[in-house]
Image (cartoon, grey):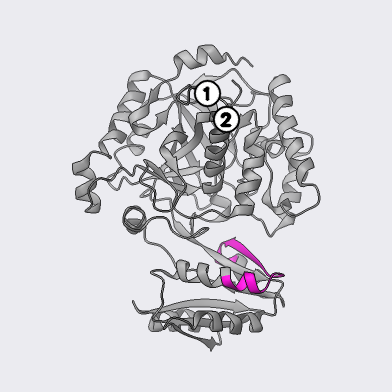
Amino acid sequence: MRINRSLAEEKTMFFDNIALGVPSILLPNPEIDCSKWAVIACDQYVHDISYWEEVKSIVGDTPSTLDLIYPEVYLYDDEHEERIARVHNNMKRFVNNGIFRDEIEGFLLVDRVLPSEKSRKGLVVTLDLEHYDSHSQSKTLIRTTEGTYPKNLEARFEVRGNASLESPHILVLIDDPQKEIIEPLFDEDHPKIVDFELMMNGGQLKYHLIENKKDIARIAQKLAKRIEPDYIHQKYGVKNETLLYAMGDGNHSFAAAQKAWEKTKSTRNNKSARHPARHAMVELINLHDDAIDIEPIHRLITRVDPHTACNTLIALLNTSGTRAHLEKVSSPDAQHQRTAALSSASTYCLPYRAAGDLGILVIENPSQRTIPETMEAALDLFTRENTEAEVGFIHGEDVINDLGNKPDALGFYMPPISKDSVFESIVRHGAYPRKSISIGHADEKRYYMECRSLAY
């Protein structure tokens, strides 16, 4: 593998007005088994260690991105520092041992055939971390969709801080209902460079390389039109806004990359220098892609007596004019029907499963503007008073159905979020509470495949 950093600096295209860069991409050598190389995002199956043990069994001694990540199922074990050190050593080992092909310069056009057989389209690029601010009310080109969770952010920062490589699971949304930016690229003739089946029911992954500078500039021009004042005003009804990109998945990883860049930048005299750590590699996807489902992230409280926990939450919610109570139901169908019947602008209804029992948490006259904000505030208070309790963020109703049957577990099913409301809500109100939004189901998440050198 050849990485010529000075040459790459000269070749790389940057579009500073839209925070866009063209990545120098590392892919595994042809003899590497890609079906073992690519593994799912580190923040998936965090309550299912058997999933990750099966991944380890499949990979065996084969070089894999599993060696380059820290699966968060292991976040609370006793090997935290050792795991991070192994990740950093593996990055150097992979570079030195010729695991990668020579760098290629360009955008990757992504065709991810999901387990549902739908095809999700994407574009791998780099984004300038100078144009990102993780605060809820920021006005930058790149914005968070939701708050961050300190423990997860710190772990990602520890990995990113001394990393010599990055391999992203970050999905960044663009708001393109007319499908004018990514989708037309599939009607063009770009060479296919990756095509294989993903492990563990992940579907199929295909990459095409876009390396022609005119093609790249044309894509950048289309993106730039999305931040013209007239376009923003017509679409969102506001002025003086520049939102172009919103985090889809990988919010913590992008925030960790930005934190690591701030640390790197503090040791350099010129913050505008083209240090590779200034950019983060991501996959852009269109929020309005037919294969994309915006899924809520559910809440699971464990290490509690679930019925006592319900009553405690009721007491915490019954303040400042809010009235909350529980309504028990006998079946999932009854739960869905009663939730729909009771819900209104002034009444939030949150279905729950407590040690197998079903019910609805009814909140009248809520003090927060959304159900996620209401639950975020209540659960923060709850965990302060109940320090043994743990709050998990769960992808998929089926997982809550299973884990919510355990005797020490209380699961809440969070409500769906409309695609059309996501960008406008961020523009008008700021980010959603942490862990509110997910792109699709767990097995539809991004798999680690391409890497990029962070060495300078």
| Label 1: which secondary element | loop
Q: Which residue is mark 1?
A: 275
Q: Which mark is residue 443?
A: none
Residue depicted at 27% across the width and 39% down the height = 227
Q: Where does residue 22 sit, x and y in percent of width and height?
A: 44, 25
Above or below: residue 309 compared with residue 165: below
Splitting the image into 4 quarters, where does residue 199 fall?
A: top right
Give the spatial CA distance, label 1 vs label 2: 9 Å
Q: Are marks 1 and 2 in contact (CB under 8 Å)?
A: yes
| Quadrant holding the C terminus | top right
Q: What kind of residue is marked 2?
A: Thr
Which region shows up in magenta?
A: 381-398
Q: Amino acid at mark 1?
A: His
Left or right: 196 with respect to 117? right
Q: Quadrant of the N terminus?
A: top right
* Residue at disc 2, secondary structure: helix
Residue at the image point whose x is 37% and y is 61% from the top: 418
Query: Can residue 44 be seen at all in this image of the molecule?
Result: no
Q: Residues within 10 Å of mark 1 (few under 14, many from 20)?
A: some
**Which residue corresponds to mark 2?**
264
Q: Is residue 313 magenta?
A: no
> Which numbered disc, 1 or 2, marks the residue that appears first in the sequence?
2
- Location of residue 442 in the rendering, given as x and y in whole percent from the top left corner: 57, 54
Residue 212 location (% of width, % of height): 38, 19
Is residue 396 a member of the stretch shown in magenta? yes
